[in-house]
Amino acid sequence: MISDTGILIDGISLSYNGRSVLNNICMEFEKGRVITLLGPNGCGKTTLLKIINGLLPPTSGRVYVDCRDTRSMGPREIAKLMGHVPQAQRSTFPFTVLDVVLTGRFSYISPLSKPGKRDLEKAYRALEMVGALHIADRPYNQVSGGERQLAMIARALAQEPSFLLLDEPTSYLDFRNQIRILKTVRRFAESGLMTVVMSLHDPNHALMFSDKIVLMRKIGDGLSEMKNIIAMGAPEDVMTSENIRAAYGIDVEMLEVKGRRLLLPK
Amino acid sequence: MTVGSQMPYKKYIYIFLLISPLIAMVLSLLIGKFAIAPGDVIRLVIFNLLAAETSYPGVYHTVIFEVRLPRIFLGMLVGASLSVAGAAFQGIFRNPLVSPYILGLSSGAAFGAALALAVAPQFPVQISALFFSLVAVGFAYYIATSRGSTPIISLLLAGVIVSAVFDSLLSIIQMAVNERALQSIVYWLMGSLAAASWSKIYSALPMSLLGCAVIFLLRWRLNVLAMGDEEARSVGMNPELYKAVFVVAASLAASSVVSVVGIIGFVGLVIPHMIRMIFGPDHTHLIPLCITFGAAFMVLVDVIARVGMGFEVPVGVITTLIGAPFFAYLLRSTRSGGWE
């Protein structure tokens, strides 16, 4: 069953220096949803996001985005289709936040040209969408970690993508900004603007903000387990204490509070 | 993007820097060891432009049009090329401390020049220096590239290796040759505009212009490249391609002038840095200002080299003596030197 649109991951495997990181991953992400990759450090969430975005060639397998094999697409085409928000951000030079966001317009700007009025508008609009318009003129490496994250999301939005891939978008943020980011990307998906695929560390965030959760574990490296995916599907089905134990090796308690499921470590 | 949005005076500095080569040119034309009154210089230039006959002695004409003017234009070419190359290399390496010589360009040029000066005089010094400077850069790039990608840290180390090799080869030549030849090598190494001529300008011009033009036209892309390889790739850029293009362009610009005037230090390092400290790192402004201010700086420093002391000092020595303290001052007075 292959739907017309969305992301289809078909048998992706990746080995790094002989160590298997991802083993025959197959999954499908429907359009307009929020999909969360959840799992311990080193389980391959970041790697999988990079493979989807074509930043990293898999050892085997294919990724289809809107029914197109990403291997047949050029980097500019991919950039217009998918926006990638990486985890580590650093900048040697004190570019302004606006300059950083403008780099997202790369695939729309002809080689000998520089960003024009239209690109500026798109960049400002992207900053507005993440509520970071006020930091547009500030140096990127002098704003807070949270603001830097917002800038990187705005940069991805400036690419006008149909898919937004975020690698642990909440990791540098305080509580308020975490919720703000998650609500913002949730809104993007609900308004039909784009499909969101993100990796998260907090299982409760995953429960609250996802339409679909992919629960992953670490494989290889002397581990007997060779299947990355423990469970995937609707949050309530995936987030059980047995699955959490299988992923993280810890025991948790499930609470139902005001009709919402919460997960507490024992 | 928005120059001078917070500080209106920055706009005037911006304009001043854009026209600074003209100011430097006029100043440099008027000052010199052979005393000609400023009024006479101006009259002579105007008459010459109008192709009118003058009654000035022929030596005036020679001093202005065959000595000072070529020297000014060569200085501009050198200053602009080294500054632009420096800015491009700093962007590629995401490191404000690199100079155009980071990939062994100067060591290769020095070896090539020494070879032609002392060992194989049948080869023109300029051609030999140009050839070996580009060989050095090409070699560094080759060493650093594996499986289609050229990580900047590998490039940096490869540059160190290649520089060391050519420095050693240069030492061998310096040990082996006689004192006269050694003197000419040492003088070449210090870098000087003293032997400027129109033919030297014409020989360096095409490659220098080509390199500068490529960097100027693609300058916004340095912003994207300077964000990091992976960041560049995720917005759709092929960073390896642009790294190669910028390295080639910057090397052509720098090699073409180094092979003519020798090794002039600090300009390629300091000028981009100064501009960045005032106007920020956006290459759409940085590159044009490096071209104009680099040109002006070089011409003014050369005035000091010509008349500052009782004897002609190699301009490379002066650029370092002026550049270093100014750089130190800017580094201390600007918080974190404009980078972190």
Image: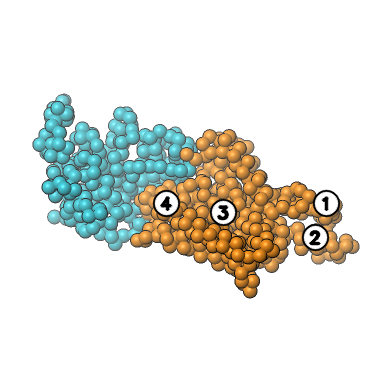
Q: Crowdedness of circle 1 by 10 Å Cα count: few (<14), some, many (20+)?
A: some
Chain B: colour as depicted: orange
The local secondary structure at tag 3 comes to: helix
Q: Amino acid at mark 1?
A: Pro
Q: Which quadrant of the figure has residue B3?
A: top right
Q: The numbered mark 1 sits on a residue in which chain?
A: B
Quick one: label 4 or label 2, which is nearer the N terminus? Answer: 2
Q: Which quadrant of the figure has residue B181?
A: bottom right
What number is the disc on residue B84? 3
Q: CA distance from mark 3 to mark 1?
A: 32 Å
Q: CA distance from mark 3 to mark 2?
A: 30 Å
The local secondary structure at tag 4 comes to: helix
Is A243 left, or right, of B61 in this rendering? left
What number is the disc on residue B38? 1
Residue closest to the eye, A20 or A185: A20
Tell me whether the residue at label 1 lies in contact with that at label 4, contact meaning CB atoms closer than 8 angstroms: no
Q: Crowdedness of circle 3 by 10 Å Cα count: few (<14), some, many (20+)?
A: many
Q: Which of the image's four quarters has the C terminus of chain A? A: top left
Is B252 left, or right, of A104 in this rendering? right
Chain A: colour as depicted: cyan
Q: Crowdedness of circle 2 by 10 Å Cα count: few (<14), some, many (20+)?
A: some
What number is the disc on residue B63? 2
Q: Which residue is mark 4?
A: B153
